[in-house]
Amino acid sequence: MKFSPNSGIVLEVTDIYGTVVRFEKKNYDKHKQYHPELRQKQFCPGQIAMALEKPTFVIKGNNPDTLCYYLELFRIRDIIKYAKVVVREADRLDKSDPHCIIKTAFKTDHVQELSYGFKPMHYN
C-alpha cells in the first residue's frame, strides 16, 4: 500500500482480485468535505486499504462498472458499522495499465445495494 497525500495519488493498493486500485487526490479532495472520516488516518488509508484487501464482502454497485467493498468495523447487537469503498472498474482489464479508481469511501450502517436486489459476490 502506498499513501501519499501530497502527490496526485492519495492511496494505491492491490485489491482482493489482484488489481491496483487508486484514490486520486482530486477525487479525495472533492469527497473529504462530505465524508470527514476521509481526513482520519485510521480510516484513510487504514480502513480503506483493509476494505480493498480483505473485505467482509463485495457487492455490485448501483452505477454501471462499479463495485462496493464493505469492511465490517464493528457490531453491537443489531447495529453494524461498515467502511464502504465505491470503486470504478472500467479500466480493470486495460492491457497497458490495469487498475481501478476509488470514486468515494465513507462509513455507513447499512448496505444500500441490497435494496436494489444485488447479492454479495465475494465474502471473506
Image: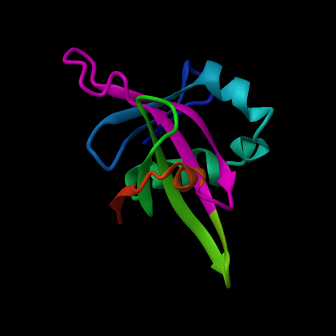
Q: Of residues 63 and 16, which is closer to you in this image?
A: 63
Residue 42 seen from this side: yes
Q: Residue furthest top?
A: 96
Q: Is residue 119 left or right of residue 42?
A: left
The quarter in which the N terminus is drawn is: top left
Q: What colour-coding does the image apply?
A: rainbow
Rendering coords of residue 119 (x, y %): 41, 56
Query: Based on the displayed image, in which of its 4 quarters is residue 31 positioned?
Result: top right
Rendering coords of residue 8 (x, y %): 55, 18
Q: Which residues are magenta?
A: 82-111
Residue ID at (72%, 24%): 30
Relative to 1, residue 29 above or below: above
Residue 6 seen from this side: no
Rendering coords of residue 74 (x, y %): 62, 73
Q: Is residue 97 magenta?
A: yes
Q: Of residues 80 and 38, which is closer to you in this image?
A: 80
Rendering coords of residue 51 (x, y %): 48, 53
Q: Is residue 3 magenta?
A: no
Query: Based on the displayed image, in which of its 4 quarters is residue 32 positioned?
Result: top right
Q: Of residues 96 and 57, which is closer to you in this image?
A: 57
Relative to 59, residue 97 above or below: above
The quarter in which the C terminus is drawn is: bottom left
Q: Is residue 91 left or right of residue 9?
A: left
Q: Of residues 42 and 91, which is closer to you in this image?
A: 91
Residue ID at (79%, 36%): 34
Residue ID at (27%, 45%): 17
Relative to 26, residue 59 above or below: below
Q: Residue furthest bottom?
A: 77
